[in-house]
Amino acid sequence: MAKAGPAAVRERVRRFALGLPGAVEEFPWGESVIKVNKKVFVFLGVGDGSHPPGITVKLKDLEAHAHALTAPGAKPAGYGLGKSGWVQIPLAEQAAPVAELLCDWTEESYRVIAPKKLIAELDGG
């Protein structure tokens, strides 16, 4: 099976994120973000090809955070967001993480941001 291209991976993460309880997509600054409870949990950037594709997620779990930073080209997010656990992960790199792993990190980011009642809903409670 051929590896999905960056645009397909981004779209898969986008669809996954929008499937989480209470998630909505907004376009501040002309880029796609997915929010829960009016707070961003994943930045998807612009999807028009004008910038390299990538996602930015908030990872409080130390293992997940460290793992994300090992992805090719990954770095703490700009604007001071890196200090609070946000990691920017490029999708066009040769050995970029697969969609499944990016979806896991997106869910982790969601769990950091979402209210407890929505996390309980996600967990089937």
Image: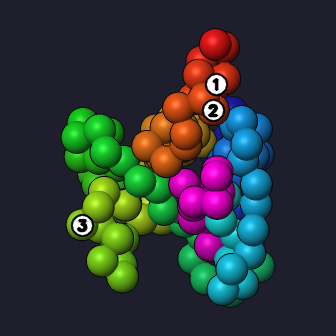
Q: Mark 2 or 3, which is nearer the eye? A: 2
Task: Kindly check if marks 2 and 1 are in contact, taking CB atoms under 8 A apart as contact.
Answer: yes
| Secondary structure found at label 3 | helix
| Secondary structure found at label 1 | helix
| Secondary structure found at label 2 | helix
Which corner quadrant of the image does residue 117 belong to?
Answer: top right
Task: Give x and y (percent) for residue 104.
Answer: 51, 35
Which sits in the foreground, 40 or 76? 40
How far apart, in angstroms, are the residues tagged by discs 1 and 3? 27 Å
Q: For the magenta stretch, what is the residue range? A: 35-46
Position of 89 with respect to 65 (left or right) is right
Task: Give x and y (percent) for residue 44.
Answer: 62, 65
Q: Amino acid at mark 1?
A: Leu
Q: Amino acid at mark 2?
A: Leu
- Quarter of the picture holding the N terminus: top right
Task: Give x and y (percent) for residue 45.
Answer: 62, 73
Magenta span: chief secondary structure: strand
Above or below, 97 against 93 in this view is above
| Residue at position x 66%, y 86% in the image | 29
Residue tagged 3? 83
Label placed on residue 118:
2
Residue 111 in sight from this viewpoint: yes
How far apart, in angstroms, are the residues tagged by discs 2 and 3? 26 Å
User: Which badge, 1 or 3, comes first in the chain's sequence?
Assistant: 3
Which corner quadrant of the image does residue 42 belong to?
Answer: bottom right
Residue tagged 1? 122
Above or below, 37 against 55 in this view is above
Q: Amino acid at mark 3?
A: Lys
Residue 6 located within the stretch drawn in magenta: no
Colouring mode (rainbow / by chain / secondary structure / one colour): rainbow
Above or below, 80 against 29 in this view is above
